[in-house]
Amino acid sequence: MPDIKHKPDVEAEKPQLQRPPLYHVVMLNDDYTPMEFVIEVMVRFFHKSEDTANKLMLQIHHQGSARCGLFPRDVAETKIHQVETASRTSGHPLRCIMERESSDQ
Ligand code: TYC
C-alpha cells in the first residue's frame, strides 16, 4: 500500500463563516379565531403595538398569513408553542408555522 499522507485541503474546504439561520414565525388565518384575540397574541408574545398588531391581523385575515417575527430556531419554536397553548386554552384554532430565512436576504 502506498503511504499517502492526507494533508487537510484548506483550499477545498468550505469557509466556516455561516451563522445559524433565523426563522420567521408566520401566523395563519382561520375562520374562527376572534380578531381581538389575534391582536392580543401579537401584543403579548411578539411585543407589537396595538396599531401594528391590528394591521398584521388584517393582513393575515385578507391574505392568509403574515410574518410576526424573526428568531433563532429555539425561540421561534417557543413562540409558536406559547401562541398555540394560549389559543387552545381559550378554545381557538389559531396556528403559526416556522419559515427559515432565505440565505440571499
Ligand atoms: N379570520 C378570522 C375571523 O374572521 C380572524 C383571524 C385573523 C384569524 C388572523 C386568524 O391569524 C388570524 N374571525
Image (cartoon, rainbow, N blue to C red):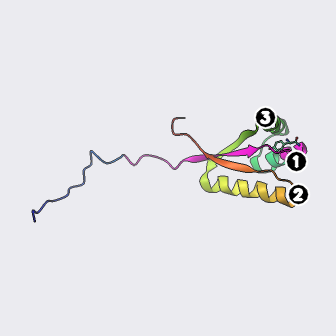
Q: Which mark is residue 91?
A: 2
Is 44 magenta? The answer is: no
Viewer-proximal residue among 16 and 59: 59
The part of the chain drawn in magenta is: 15-39
* Disc 2 secondary structure class: loop
Quarter occupied by the C terminus: top right
Q: Which mark is residue 32?
A: 1
Q: Please tell me which residue lies in front, 29 or 11.
A: 29
What is the CA distance from the residue labelled 3 to the residue labelled 1? 16 Å
Quarter of the image where one finds residue 101:
top right
The disc, 3 or 2, on the residue closer to the chain's N-terminal end is 3
Q: Nearer the viewer, residue 47 or 22?
A: 22
In the image, residue 23 lies in the stretch drawn in magenta: yes
Mark 1 residue element:
loop
Task: Residue type at mark 2: give it.
Answer: Gly
The three-letter code of the residue at mark 3 reads Gln
According to the picture, the residue beneath numbered tag 3 turns out to be 59
